[in-house]
Image (cartoon, rainbow, N blue to C red):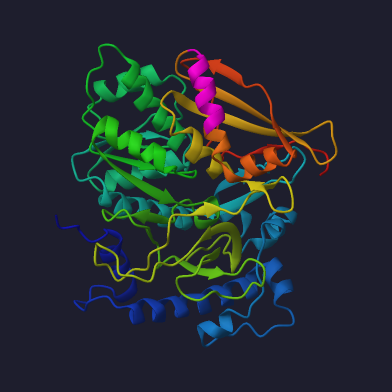
Amino acid sequence: MDIKTTSLEPWIKGKVNGDSSEILTRKQIEDYQLTKLRETLCLVNSQSRFYKRLYSDIDCKISTFQEFLKLPFTTSEDLKENPLDFLCVSQNEIHRIVTLQSSGTTGKPKRFFFTEADQELTIDFFHHGMLTLVEPGDRVLIMLPGETTGSVGDLLRMGLERAGVTGVVHGLVSNPEQTLEQIRRNNINALVGIPTQVLSLARFQNCQEKSVPLSLRSVLLSTDYVPRAIVQELERTWGCKVFNHYGMTEMGLGGGLECEGFCGYHFREADLYIEIIDPRSGLPVEEGQPGEIVLTTLTRTAMPLVRYRTGDMSRFIPDPCKCHTVLKRLELVKSRDRVCLTETDYLTMADFDEALFALDNILDFEVTLTKGRLENESYLLIKVHLKGSLSMKTQTDILEALDKIPGIWDARQNGHLKVMPMLVTSTEVIARKSTAKRQIQDKRRSF
């Protein structure tokens, strides 16, 4: 079966070389990006208080990518310290402010500012990117916040409208049964949502005695790590294509999107410049090697970011994509956030996702670490949201799945970790209040 070229390529071609009939090349993209990098550096060096200070002793007039890679990084802590210092426009030009609360209880939040032109860039990306998985006449249920003007769901609805697609803003899922009924009633054939919330719909439908089949052709999962187990469950339940989106507020919400090859993200190369660096040395890695994603915005006006360290891990895939695009391809992203148990043992939320979502009746779960009674001992508490009640078999399956996570097995064998009795919620209501990424809650005072 022929795989169609990502819908991002003709869109990016139009930005890079206009209406030219020339075939888009890597050189054209890179020449465009270098020009935009120069423009962005000129903007921030003249208008941003933060970058004026950062570059006060540096000549930031670049002529090559190699010169650009010598510039200092921007970090998450920089953004938290004084976000207004990043502004390159007056505050009365700000159209939307997004606040991201720190995962800790006392950490400073990150605040991001967008002009109307900045949000137009996101709408434009949603318009063209979504054509990878939908077509004119389709009806998409948007299971993301969208009640507020300029919110992610609202921007996606506007982008879909430009593509001739009806976007129905639903918001986050609180009652899967009611959401399933809305899908049927509105003749929905595509979904956009958070991985665990979309999984809850599939598993509730599987448990319904007289379930009416859904006519879903595609699903887009976004805002969090996408476990392979969830993708397989959705494909099996609905017989649809499941696409993965990678983005963050720092990128302007939209970042990269899988094509029908399902082997990595193609991203907004006309709006974003992506590097992969060694997280320890800060130096660029060889092509194809994994490292930390570093982001530079190319077309942002309110709050441009230059060499921003995301903390996410990926690599550029050097082999050509199955869709034959000239665009680069990022391997599916993993967060670098991890919790250490010992000097050699650590845990990530992705470890738990892959292990536990492979079990049939788990809808969601929460992971907490607390300090144990003994020195260098940690307690692991799992709160599980199930469809149905907890049976002895389910409890055994969960414990066996946890032991397949190398960090847990090793730490238990060495006496550094104790798995505590599980807390179980059996409910048809999923208490998810935001699109924030799920994280391990580390409540140990010290280690």
As rendered, which of 372 and 181 lies closer to the eye?
372
Residue 151 visible? The answer is: yes
Q: Position of residue 168 (x, y in %)?
A: 33, 32
**Residue 247 is one of the magenta-drawn residues:** no
Q: Position of residue 245 (x, y in %)?
A: 40, 49
Residue drawn at 25 percent across, 38 percent down: 240
Residue drawn at 34 percent across, 34 percent down: 233
The quarter in which the C terminus is drawn is top right
Magenta part, dominant SS: helix
| Direction front: furthest residue | 413
Residue 244's place in the image compared with 374, above or below, is below
Q: Position of residue 395 (x, y in %)?
A: 54, 21
Is residue 205 shown left or right of residue 298? left
Is residue 303 shown left or right of residue 147? right
Residue 293 visible? The answer is: no
**Residue segment shown in magenta:** 389-400
Residue drawn at 65 percent across, 62 percent down: 86
Residue drawn at 81 percent across, 41 percent down: 376
Is residue 20 shown left or right of residue 357? left
